Amino acid sequence: MSEALLQANGLSKRYGGLLAVNDVSLSLYKDQLHAVIGPNGAGKTTLTHLLSGDVAATHGELWLNGRNVSGWSHDRLSLHGLGRSYQKTNVFLALSVWDNLMLAAQSRQARAPYNPLAWLSNASTDKAVRERAERALQLTGLAQEQQIIAANLSHGVQRQLEIAMVLATEPQVLLLDEPLAGMGTAEAEAMVVLLHKLKKDHAMLLVEHDMDAVFALAEVLTVMVNGTVIASGTPQEIRADAKVQAAYLGEETA
């Protein structure tokens, strides 16, 4: 197997007397979806915060593309190929789908340091920016909605737009925190199709409560309980693990 694009070694996060994440290690590879599951309060979202740089780890190391990026901020990690979506949809509701994507794509546009007036240029005419936005639009199937104001989109399409905005930054690693939350059956099915399409070009981590989607998409699962990993393996191994069944899955996988 190729080198991991994102690797966590012994990540821990302590809040006073609470150990929210305890010595978690995992590796994310291109063309592989790695799901993290567990009951509420298991530490899944905190782990995602640690991987994305939104929260600093108390202990442990984080490596991105073979480079030690421990302690890097979210913005810095994003500039080096890490993209993340959140539990709560994070889009500009007053703007159109296309303008949301252009803003995301523009964030990656290099500006020549020798030209102090470069920031005055019109990003809407920048070919590279428009190409990034267009690729994200096509990948997520939002071409027909591109002129619709984001506030007028359904919840499921807003979630697609958020992922499209992440894709417009051209990430190599995608961290997706409950992308199917609050969706109806049809919207959830569309999101599963999208995630399946995206994983061939990205290393992906998925935090999700929809077990049907998880077992349909993931090649590797990590199960957390009370901040600690209790099992990690293939879907078949996780289904058969007695500790996982007792702590979380129960009869859902019978």
Image (cartoon, rainbow, N blue to C red):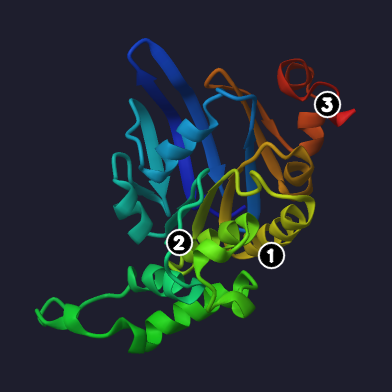
Foreground pick, 167 / 239: 167
Q: Position of residue 69 (x, y in %)?
A: 33, 46
Kind of residue at disc 2: Leu
Q: Residues within 10 Å of mark 1 (few under 14, many from 20)?
A: some
Q: Residues within 10 Å of mark 3 (few under 14, many from 20)?
A: few
Residue 93 numbered tag: 2
Q: Is residue 185 above or below residue 252?
A: below
For discs 3 and 1, the disc positioned in front in the rendered view: 1
Circle 2/circle 3 CB separation < 8 Å: no
Q: Residue furthest front?
A: 152
Tell me the quarter of the image containing the C terminus.
top right
- Residue at image point 61% right, 55% down: 155
Q: Quadrant of residue 57?
A: top left
Q: Is residue 195 above or below residue 238?
A: below
Q: Secondary structure at mark 3?
A: helix
- Residue at image point 79% right, 51% down: 185
For discs 2 and 1, the disc positioned in front in the rendered view: 2
Kind of residue at disc 1: Lys
- Residue at image point 30% right, 54% down: 76
The alpha-carbon separation of the residues under discs 2 and 3 comes to: 44 Å
Q: Residues within 10 Å of mark 2 (few under 14, many from 20)?
A: some
The alpha-carbon separation of the residues under discs 3 and 1 comes to: 28 Å
Q: Position of residue 93 (x, y in %)?
A: 45, 61
Q: Position of residue 195 (x, y in %)?
A: 66, 58
Kind of residue at disc 3: Ala
Direction from residue 44 to residue 73 in the image, left or right = left
Circle 3/circle 1 CB separation < 8 Å: no
Residue 197 numbered tag: 1
Q: Secondary structure at mark 2?
A: loop
Q: Read off the residue under disc 3.
A: 240
- Residue at image point 61% right, 49% down: 179
